[in-house]
Amino acid sequence: MVRCGSGSRRRGEVATIRGDFDYPLPTELVAQRPSATRSDSRLLCLERSLEDGIFTDLPGRLRPGDLLVFNDTRVIPARLPARKASGGRLEVLVERVVDDGRLRAQIRGGGALKPGARLRLAEAFDVELLGREGELFELRVLDPRPVASLLELYGRIPLPPYIDRAADERDRERYQTVYARRPGAVAAPTAGLHFDEALLKTLQARGVELAYLTLHVGAGTFQPLRVDDLREHRMHAEVAQVSEDLCRRAVAARARGGRVVAVGTTVVRALESAAGGGELRPFEGETRLFITPGYDFKVVDALITNFHLPQSTLLMLVCALGGYERVMAAYRHAVAQRYRFFSYGDAMFLRRQNHG
C-alpha cells in the first residue's frame, strides 16, 4: 500500500500542506508494464460529473476548434552502469546533456566522489567529474564520439523508480510517445503514451488542431517533497521551449471559442511559464514553476493526464486545475474501480474548475 501521511486541511480551505495530497493506493494498482496497445487504456472523465470510459472515447470529449497541445520531447537512454578506478560499482542517471562534451547526472553511490575522479561508463567510455551542485554531478566525456551516440549505444531507458523491473527492448518503444522528436528527457511525458497514429488522425478529422512544444522532463519529477508547507518547496528546473507559432494558435483557438487542452502536466507547466508575464509569449529556457491550488491559470482550459503519486507536485498541479475536492474524489473513485496508476497506467480527462 502506497501512503505517506495525512493533512489537517478544513473543507473549503486552500490545500497548502503536503499531507493534504495523500491517498491510499494498493501496490498492485501501480502499472508495471504498458497495456497491450497504446489507446486501449481506460479514461476517467471529470467534467460536470465523473464518468468511466476508455481512451478512444477522447475525440468525443473534445470539440472542433479545440487546440490539443503535446510535448514532443524524446526520452534518452540515460541510465548507465559505472565503475570507479578502484573497481567500485555505481550507476549514472544522466539528467541533461549540457553540450557535446558535458553531462549533468545523478550518481547513485557517488557521494564521496571528488573533482578529477574518473568513471568508466558501461565498460565503454570514460568521464571525468568536474564538480557538483546539489544532487547533480557535472561530467566531462573523455571520448571523441558524440554524446548522443554514446547514450544510444550503451544507455538503458530510465524507467521510473516505482517500476520494479529492468527496462527491456519493448520499453524503448513504449516508454516513448509516437510523436517524440527532440531528445533530452529522462522521463516520458506519460499522458502522451496513450496516443497512436490512428487516434491522432481521428482527432484531426473531428476538427481538433494539434500543436507541439518541448519540455525536457528531468529526474526531479520523481523526487518527493521534503517540506510540509508547499510554500517552502523549490521546484526542480526543466528546460522548455514554446514557439511563437504555438502562441498565435493558442490565442486564435480561444478567440474562436475553442479550448487549449494540455496533454500532460509538462505541457501545463510550459504554457503557464510562457504566460508568466500575464500574456502568452514565446518562451525558451528553464522553468521552476510550481502550480498548487489557488493558482490563476492563464492559458490551459483542460488537461489529459495520468494518475500521479501521493503527495507529488504533479498531483498538486492537477488539483489546482480541476479543483482539490473534485480531483481527490476522482482519485478515490479510481482506486475503488481498480484503475492502473502512474507512467504505464490509465488516464484522466478534466476541465479547469468553473470553466466550460
Image (spheres, rainbow, N blue to C red):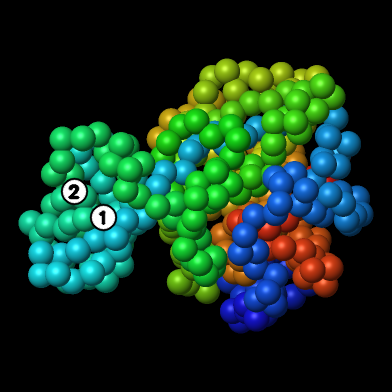
When the figure is inspected, residue 55 is found, relative to residue 221, above or below; the finding is: above
Residue at the front extreme of this rendering = 169
Q: Are marks 1 and 2 in contact (CB under 8 Å)?
A: yes
When the figure is inspected, residue 258 is found, relative to residue 90, above or below; the finding is: above
Mark 2 is surrounded, within 10 Å at the Cα level, by few (under 14), some (14 to 19) or many (20 or more) other residues, namely some
Res 241 seen here:
yes
Tell me which residue sits at (64%, 45%) in the image: 193
Query: Quarter of the image containing the C terminus?
Result: top right
74 left or right of 148? right
Pointer 2 residue = 125
Q: Nearer the viewer, residue 218 or 56?
A: 56
Residue 304 in which image quadrant? top right
Tell me which residue sits at (40%, 47%) in the image: 77
Tell me how far mark 1 sits from mark 2, CA to CA: 7 Å
Mark 2 residue type: Phe
Tell me which residue sits at (48%, 38%) in the image: 74
When the figure is inspected, residue 111 is found, relative to residue 174, above or below; the finding is: below
Could you say which disc has been placed on residue 122 in the image?
1
Mark 1 residue type: Ala
Tell me which residue sits at (30%, 67%) in the image: 108
Mark count: 2
Q: Where is residue 43 shown, x and y percent of the image?
A: 80, 51
Q: Where is residue 44 shown, x and y percent of the image?
A: 82, 54
Q: Where is residue 270 shown, x and y percent of the image?
A: 54, 38
Q: Nearer the viewer, residue 33 or 239?
A: 33
35 left or right of 48? left
Mark 1 is surrounded, within 10 Å at the Cα level, by few (under 14), some (14 to 19) or many (20 or more) other residues, namely many
